[in-house]
Amino acid sequence: MDRRLVEPAGLVKPGYCLLVFGPEAKTCVWIIEDGDTLYVDRNANGDLTEAGEAFAPGERRDHMASVDGKSFRKHRDWTYYIGDVTPNNGLTKHTGFKLTRHRSEDEPAHHILSVLVGGATLQYAGWGPLFGASRDTAPVVHFGGPVVAKLIRSSVAIKGADDRELHFCIGTPGIGSHSFAYVGEQALPLAIRPVVEINWPTQGGPRKECFELPWRC
């Protein structure tokens, strides 16, 4: 993967994240986080020194929140409203791009990216640290790529006496922690009811059961 990039001058402690778009990941959009400033390669030409690609937080929120019902910690939320990402070939525009950075006390910041891929399909990534210390270690998030199903809230399905809920999402795997690009549930038509097939291991051999998943959130 081509990781060439023209960086802004005077960076102090930058973090790097690479977004790729499309089934074949041919469009590359670099993001650099440095202090309060977020640089976004909105025309996907690999040059972050151009006008209109440096952003300050459009919204800042500092608040105290309880973690365990007893102690309170300081939380800081910064939201960057990027707008449209238009590759320089002009073929596709990705709209409504937004990044929120959440930080609790001195813990590493967590990030949430969201964008309407092709101006139509809402996708998310993040809910954890999403920037690497260098271009070579930068996570790669793939928007608009082939989708797969992924279990959430649990890594295994357990059959037992108690009722169990099965939660899954769809999206495109990326490279690095928190890089899975989730597809918003609005993208799946209401007439489609996903079905999961489970082969339970038993003494007599695998036993197959199918379950319809009717609920969305």
Image (spheres, grey):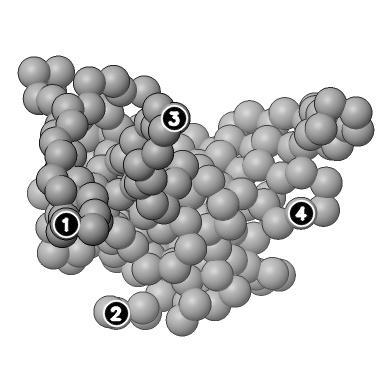
- Residues under labels 4 and 2: Cα distance? 32 Å
Q: Looking at the image, which residue is at 86% across and 36% down? A: 73
Answer few, some or many: residues within 10 Å of disc 4's Cα (few below 14, many 20 plus, some between 14 and 19).
Answer: few
Q: Which residue is mark 1?
A: 204
Task: Name the residue type under label 4.
Answer: Glu
Marks 1/3: CA–CA distance: 23 Å
> Element under label 4?
loop
User: Measured from the top left, where is residue 108 in percent x and y?
Assistant: 70, 56
The residue beneath circle 3 is: 162
Distance (Cα) linking label 4 and label 3: 37 Å
Which residue is under mark 4? 107
Reply above or below: 12 against 98: below
The residue depicted at 81 percent of the width and 32 percent of the height is 68
The residue type indicated by label 2 comes to Asp
Q: Nearer the viewer, mark 4 or mark 1?
A: 1
Q: Evaluate if marks 4 and 3 touch, with contact meaning CB atoms under 8 Å apart.
A: no
Task: Give whichever of discs 1 and 2 has the lower sequence position.
Answer: 2
- Relative side of 208 to 36, left or right: left
Numbered disc in front, either 1 or 3: 1
From the top left corner, tell me how far across and down residue 106 is, in percent. Answer: 82, 53
Reading the image, the residue beneath label 2 is: 2
Q: Mark 1 vs mark 2: give the one in front.
A: 1
Left or right: 104, with 151 as reference point: right
Residue lying at the far front of the rendered structure: 204
Which of the two discs, 4 and 2, sits closer to the camera?
Answer: 4
Q: Amino acid at mark 1?
A: Gly
